[in-house]
Image (cartoon, grey):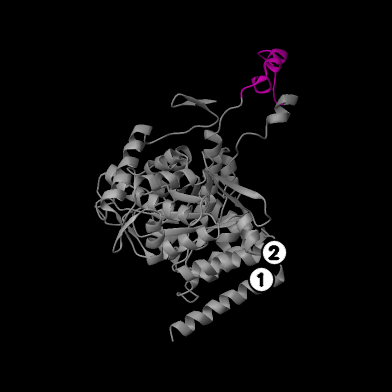
């Protein structure tokens, strides 16, 4: 048991903001919503908000405090996602933390050649199968933007590939509203119908919102559509402090949080009780030195997650990523720190494991490395069971100071419980040389190839696979006709 912030807990936790700071940011967000307002770029969303008590002036929407407080009271504290077999896979809430990949990297660091190249659809398939196999990876995202399919509907091809190559929960991203509808249709086909999917959802949509103060039409349309269906959604506005919001962490977070509260309110007005995930990254100063959207910055760590924990809502976090371009020391420390902080702060659905170069590059090798890091981090932060069995006082008295514990039945009962890395070398130098003097990165590359060669995903029925293919072909025909 670990004592943290005056409470006895089963595992280690850390809060970047205290309740007083969270309350001040919350009150500031309410004032922004009521006094300044947010630009809402969808007519139907404005109508729903106005009917719920908001004041609408053109595209500017101002929401009264009472309506926000009502929405927070109806939004569920937990988001439950299932696997394809219909079993609970993720109870995203409280301090339950789950990790998965990211989406849409424009480049891949090839684990066989160590060269950067454009990804293809097979890389999406390989990433899905790898994440399906790795025990510390809890959900799957597309990882790459395939360059060998129609770029107008690449997300449809991604969704087909993920559904066919993992049974774990999926977080999907679509560039347009129509893609969200197609993705849900595919999930309903796999589930056996709309009602079956709504009852046991195994996928959720990551909705990208322009910023805290600007709600774009596609994001609002997705929010309304998913809420109408009763499906969980991730409503994620992100700010860049010093660019589209105050450079100070508090000001950046307050304005970003105002946009999050608008999304929660809209979703609850459409359907009370629909689960909404909130941001667990950004909310701090942008890198004004490089003007690059970095994925691992010190000042923002834990700030938005603290707000999510303050509201006791599911938090969509970020971790296991780096701004480095190669698997070097920067990559090692940034991926580890971001995994560690997301876990300790209590983010629930942590994505972008394996991301590099500010999200421009992904690596299967790094996903395998992060899987290993996560095993260590989870072991080092979980609570320690202290009882008669683990104190082993009778065993100590039996063996006395000079006794050997190696063959004792107590040791045989518990020796498999500690964490043992599959990639880190912990043996003597001579053994390392005998095994080829490999680096951890080389061993990770070998693990990726072994998984891709041996891991089998439970296949979908042939009629379902044909149905998925028909949806993709329909979308391809639609975009062809649309673009002449």
Residue 473 included in the magenta stretch of the image? no
Q: With 42 as the anchor, is 481 left or right in this view?
A: right
In the rendered image, is residue 111 in sight? no
Q: Which residues are magenta?
A: 386-406
In the rendered image, is residue 262 in sight? yes
Quarter of the image for residue 50 reads bottom left
Decide: is 44 above or below 90. Answer: below
- Crowd band around label 2 with a 10 angstrom C-alpha radius: few (<14), some (14–19), many (20+): few
Q: Which residue is mark 2?
A: 459
Quarter of the image for residue 404 reads top right
Q: Which residue is mark 1?
A: 465
Quadrant that contains the N terminus: top right
Circle on res. 192: none
Residue at position x 48%, y 80% in the image:
479
Residue 395 included in the magenta stretch of the image? yes
Q: Are marks 1 and 2 in contact (CB under 8 Å)?
A: yes
Decide: is 216 above or below 199. Answer: below
């Amino acid at each position: 048991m670990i004592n943290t912030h005056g409470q006895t807990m089963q595992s280690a936790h850390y809060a970047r903001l205290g309740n007083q700071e969270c309350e001040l940011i919350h009150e500031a967000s309410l004032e922004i919503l009521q006094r300044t307002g947010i630009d809402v770029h969808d007519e139907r969303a404005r109508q729903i908000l106005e009917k719920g008590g908001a004041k609408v002036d053109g595209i500017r929407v101002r929401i009264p405090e009472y309506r926000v407080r009502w929405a927070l009271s109806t939004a569920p504290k937990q988001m439950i996602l299932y696997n394809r077999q219909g079993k609970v896979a993720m109870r995203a809430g409280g301090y339950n933390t789950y990790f998965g990949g990211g989406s849409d990297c424009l480049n891949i660091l090839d684990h066989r050649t160590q060269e950067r190249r454009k990804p293809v659809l097979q890389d999406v398939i390989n990433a899905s199968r790898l994440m399906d196999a790795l025990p510390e990876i809890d959900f799957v995202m597309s990882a790459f933007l395939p360059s060998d399919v129609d770029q107008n509907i690449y997300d449809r091809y991604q969704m087909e590939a993920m559904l066919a190559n993992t049974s774990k929960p999926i977080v999907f991203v679509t560039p347009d509203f129509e893609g969200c509808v197609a993705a849900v249709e595919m999930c309903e086909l796999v589930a056996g119908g709309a009602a079956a999917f709504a009852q046991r959802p195994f996928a959720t949509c990551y909705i990208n919102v322009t910023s805290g103060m600007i709600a774009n039409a596609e994001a609002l349309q997705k929010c309304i559509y998913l809420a109408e269906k009763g499906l969980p959604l991730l409503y994620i506005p992100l700010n860049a402090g010093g660019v589209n919001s105050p450079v100070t962490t508090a000001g950046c977070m307050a304005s970003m949080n105002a946009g999050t509260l608008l999304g929660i309110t809209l979703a609850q007005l459409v359907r009370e009780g629909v689960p909404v995930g909130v941001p667990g990254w950004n909310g701090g100063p942008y890198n004004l030195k490089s003007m690059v959207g970095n994925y691992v910055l010190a000042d923002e760590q834990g700030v938005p997650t603290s707000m999510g924990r303050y509201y006791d809502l599911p938090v969509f976090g970020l971790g296991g990523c780096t701004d480095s371009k190669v698997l070097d020391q920067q990559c090692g420390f940034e991926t580890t720190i971001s995994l560690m902080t997301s876990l300790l702060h209590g983010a629930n659905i942590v994505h972008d494991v394996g991301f590099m170069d500010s999200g421009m590059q992904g690596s299967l090798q790094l996903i395998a490395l992060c899987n290993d890091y996560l095993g260590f981090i989870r072991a080092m932060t979980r609570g320690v069971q202290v009882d008669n069995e683990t104190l082993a006082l009778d065993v100590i008295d039996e063996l006395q100071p000079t006794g050997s514990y190696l063959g004792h039945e107590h040791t045989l009962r518990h020796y498999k419980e500690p964490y043992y890395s599959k990639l880190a070398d912990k043996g003597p130098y001579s053994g390392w040389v005998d095994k080829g003097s490999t680096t951890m990165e080389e061993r990770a590359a070998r693990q990726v190839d072994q998984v891709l060669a041996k891991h089998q995903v439970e296949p979908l029925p042939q009629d379902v696979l044909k149905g998925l293919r028909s949806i993709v072909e329909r979308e391809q025909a639609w975009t062809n006709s649309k673009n002449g």
